[in-house]
Image (cartoon, rainbow, N blue to C red):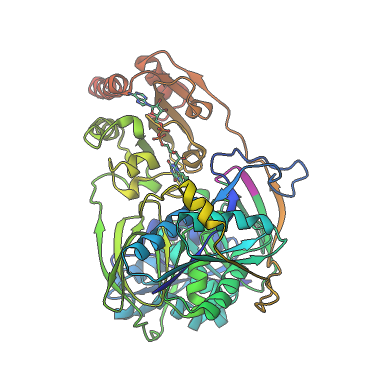
Amino acid sequence: MKILVPVKRVVDYNVTVRVKADGSGVETANVKMSMNPFDEIANEEAIRLKEKGAASEVVAVTIGEAKAQETLRTAMAMGADRALHVETQARTDTELQPLAVAKLLQALVEREQPDLVIMGKQAIDDDSNQTGQMLAALLGWPQATFASKIELVEGGLEVTREVDAGLEKLWVKLPAIVTVDLRLNEPRYASLPNIMKAKKKPIDKLTPEELGVDTAPRLTYVKVEEPPKRQAGVKVADVPALLDKLKSEAGVI
Amino acid sequence: MAEILVVAEHDNAKLDKATLHGVTAAAALGTVTLLVAGEGAAAVAEAAAKVAGVAKVVHVDDAAYAEPVAENLASLVVAMADGYDGFVVGASTFGKNLMPRVAALLDLAQISDIVEVVGPKSFKRYIYAGNALATVETRDAKLALTVRTTAFPAAATEGGSASVETVQAVAPSDLVKFLGREVSASERPELTSARVVVSGGRGMGSGENFVIVEALADQLGAAVGASRAAVDAGYVPNDYQVGQTGKIVAPELYVAVGISGAIQHLAGMKDSKVIVAINKDEEAPIFQVADYGLVGDLFTIVPQLTEALKASKAAS
Ligand SMILES: Cc1cc2nc3c(=O)[nH]c(=O)nc-3n(C[C@H](O)[C@H](O)[C@H](O)COP(=O)(O)OP(=O)(O)OC[C@H]3O[C@@H](n4cnc5c(N)ncnc54)[C@H](O)[C@@H]3O)c2cc1C
């Protein structure tokens, strides 16, 4: 079984992002970038399937500027075998949009013929939560989103999904798309020797044009602004003072 | 007037509240049709017809829709798509799973988790864990939207008198099978629509200790939520998680107990009307958004608060 793992380079989750004064977007210059945390979980799951002997090859793919190759190196240092880089100058938080990403991935799936695509349920920059479902639709494959457990069974997968009411279990036939949630696993850190080894693993470079995909944005980001700020309140001394405030000032109890 | 199709979320017995919020957003865009696809869900279709602002209900009764399987629902919506200018669903896990599949099949860009309708093609939504608010406009001919439920009031469940039409099912997919669910049973109000929410974080120290939070929630008639750290540690089930990648809540009163206030948590609760934080670290970022902060040990303060509420109830 061959597994494709799309990974995205995003502003690190620990960075407090700043909105640009001209309202055009979020400041990404000189900001720490990392692999989207959900994609680390996806990559980890694929690598574990390979280590168990259930998968033969793990191929990481990213779409983004030249520096996005760092994210592919990280994926390979974790254990992915090789990588594909679709290079674009478009900003991946706003200009390169989920439907275009899904179309690029569709083209890559058609070239690579994986049996399974495992990917993050959402990227923590645009927070869209769309790409996996869109890719499944374009390929006509089944989708198992928000996975917290993946089991291989005859002819397919049994996937436990995190939903609003608790958990759901689905069977999907392979080939399939799985998008992962936080509880699926705890991704490993790459060891130094593996980081060195990853430098020698191959990255194939491609362009949207070579893949025949029109990536022009369908959505215009008219304006990006600071959200309304909450006023910091007061510290109260003790429980009676708190109760008094909640009753007489806030009127919520 | 634009024709908007809202996909109803339900369990074949009851309409989910997320749908009522979706109807309100859709009504700002055009005439609302509510699609009720289920098995033996006639009661849901009837209830849907009474929802204020719904002009038409389309009811599909088939075993294919007994469970919310995205593949089957998406095929159905796509088969009906010609008559509509927009597709809307609540941004619940049901809606998040379904709408991108519909959008891609119709070659539409989706706008996720909208918090405001700015114009017929233009919407506001948060990006970067709520750190930025974007106004996004689509150039596509049709809309595909998911709606943040806390940003739009629920449509009234009475007052509407929609016509009910039935349509044929579309052949189900044989690539997917629903195997079952594990629902966290609770007598408490539902987290995303509760008037009061009490959430516990890593500071709770264990699942057993959550009884302290539950006792407080009982006194307040509150739902119980949690931070990611508390869910990851196994103190409480995944459906308690409030935040960027969990549930969005905006109650009248949110009490954060032993929660530091990471941006990913704040993204899920900072639109609450009143926020109370109980934390032993006076520097914890949660205090920057809290209306009322109480610095101290939660294991002392929370039981005190519970007792005081009990006493004041007994007195009144
Ligand atoms: C991709 C991604 C997605 C995420 N999504 C979410 C999300 O949706 N929701 C979410 O909540 N987080 C999310 N997080 C995690 C988030 O970054 C924080 O790690 C998490 O919110 C921390 O939880 P916490 O506040 O309970 O724990 P901590 O940050 O460890 O805080 C515990 C707090 O408890 C206090 N405390 C300890 N003991 C006591 C005591 N006895 N009395 C009083 N106070 C005490 C401490 O002072 C501290 O402030 C996400 C992270 C990533 C990377």
Q: State the predominant SS element of the stretch in magenta.
A: loop
B282 or A12, which is in the foreground?
A12
Residue B132 in magenta stretch? yes
- Looking at the image, the residue that sits furthest to the right is A22
Can you give x and y, in whole percent of width and height, for residue B184 in the image? 25, 52
Residue A144 screen position, x and y as percent: 38, 67
Q: Is residue B113 visible?
A: no
> What residue is at 71 percent from the left and 61 percent from the top?
A90
Q: Quadrant of ligand 1?
A: top left
* B216 to B16, vertically: above or below: above
Q: Residue A151, relative to residue A18: is it above or below?
A: below
Name the residue furthest top: A237
Residue B132 appears in the figure: yes
Residue B186 placement, left or right of A22: left
Give me the residue at 44% from left, 80% from top. B76
Please determine whether, in this image, residue B189 is positioned above or below residue B293. Answer: below
Residue A135, position as x, y percentages in the image: 51, 72
Q: Position of residue A117 (x, y in %)?
A: 45, 69
Residue at horizontal 63 percent and vertical 56 percent from the top: A68
Q: Is residue B69 above or below residue A200?
A: below
Q: Give yes or no for residue A13 being in the magenta stretch.
A: no
* B99 relative to A160 in the view: left or right: right
Q: Which residues are magenta?
A: B129-133
The quarter of the rendered structure image containing the C terminus of chain B is top left
Q: Is residue B123 left or right of residue A59?
A: right
Residue A247 vs residue B179, the one in the foreground:
B179
Q: How many marks?
A: 0
The quadrant of the picture occupied by the N terminus of chain B is bottom right
* Residue at x 35%, y 51% (from the top left corner): A183
